[in-house]
Image (cartoon, rainbow, N blue to C red):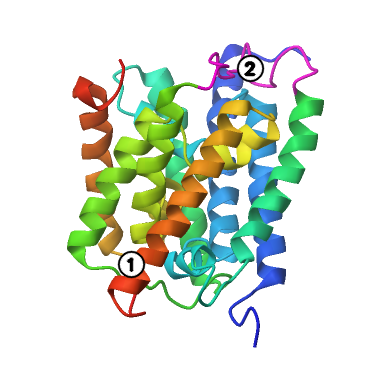
Amino acid sequence: MAISKGKRKFFHLLSSLVCGTIFGIGLAVSQMVNPQKVINFLDITGRWDPSLALVMFVAVSISYVTYNLTLKRKKPLFDSKFYLPTKKDVDREIFSGAAFFGIGWGMTGLCPGPAFAALGYGSVRVIVFLCAMYIGFFAATHLKFLHSK
Amino acid sequence: MLFENYTPVAALIGGTLIGLSVAFLMYSIGRLSGISGIAQNITTLKLEDFAWRFLFLFGLILGAFISNIFEWGPKEILVTPSDFRILIGGLLVGIGTKIGHGCTSGHGVCGLSLVSKRSIYSVIVFMSCGIGTVYIMRALTNGNF
């Protein structure tokens, strides 16, 4: 089924918007958009709330099956190829990056997705988080001492 | 009562929606739903690279906004840490996700779905650090966290 380049571009963008919206609804319905819910999950010795584990389990299960089916195809519907990570080996950056991320996540209960979604709930405080996050992106990119390259 | 805040049905439905979103993004445009990556790579002058990323992030906000209106999600969002803590935490998340090439959606959902060794290690490390950090914070603030 060949469609025109213009139509493909339109559906390319529409798909992204739809996926983002469903993801946002998913974050809200699962309450992952509420950082307190995340903190309660990480609080394993306190008021442990396993909800996040269930959210991840269900999401991973679905994408595991669908990725396996989808990646057997030649290409996605509206693009020329699948964009998968090229790095395969586990390097130092994986560990240090995850450590920094985990600490920041534990401190705030926020990570990128829910932080954006929280804007949809009118949360003004996440703007501080998002700005700091972008400063962090910039710092990590340009301050070479933070990582190997 | 054990698991006093546990919301299994909400988690099930929400997780399903997230899974479907991730599935369809790959199926339709061949992309991983790693939000830290999407947020990082959006800062580009190439319209092609910018457009779908912008619409995805806009969708995140829109979806949450719709959920807010229809009360599908939490009644309110409690961002309890102080501004200073949010600032430091945000910095660490920014640095960490850039260096470590992913976050909970990137490594946690997409990476695990691909059974990526990198992602498995990443998840183990960030979960441990998250748990450890909350433990320490609760201890330091006497439970008021």
Q: Position of residue A70 (x, y in %)?
A: 77, 25
What is the span of residues highlighted in magenta in the rendered image? A71-90
Any mark on residue B108, and which? none
Q: Is residue A137 left or right of residue B14?
A: left
The image quarter in which residue A18 lies: top right
**Dot 2 alpha-carbon crowd within 10 angstroms: few under 14, some 14 to 19, many 20 or more:** some
Of tags 1 and 2, which is closer to the observer? 1
User: Label 1 amino acid?
Assistant: Met
Q: Which SS class for mark 2?
A: loop
Q: Position of residue A29 (x, y in %)?
A: 59, 65
Q: Is residue A142 left or right of residue B67?
A: left
Q: Position of residue A50 (x, y in %)?
A: 63, 66
Q: Which SS class for mark 1?
A: helix
* Same chain, labels 1 and 2: no
**Quadrant showing the N terminus of chain B:** bottom right
Q: Position of residue B57 (x, y in %)?
A: 43, 42
Name the residue beneath numbered marker 1: B137
- In this orientation, which residue lies closer to the viewer: B141 or A30? B141
Q: Circle 1 marks a residue in which chain?
A: B
User: Label 2 amino acid?
Assistant: Phe
Q: CA–CA distance between discs 1 and 2?
A: 41 Å
- In this orientation, which residue lies closer to the viewer: B65 or B42? B42
Name the residue beneath numbered marker 2: A82
Q: Is residue A3 left or right of residue B36?
A: right
Residue B105 visible from this viewpoint = no
Residue A8 visible from this viewpoint = yes
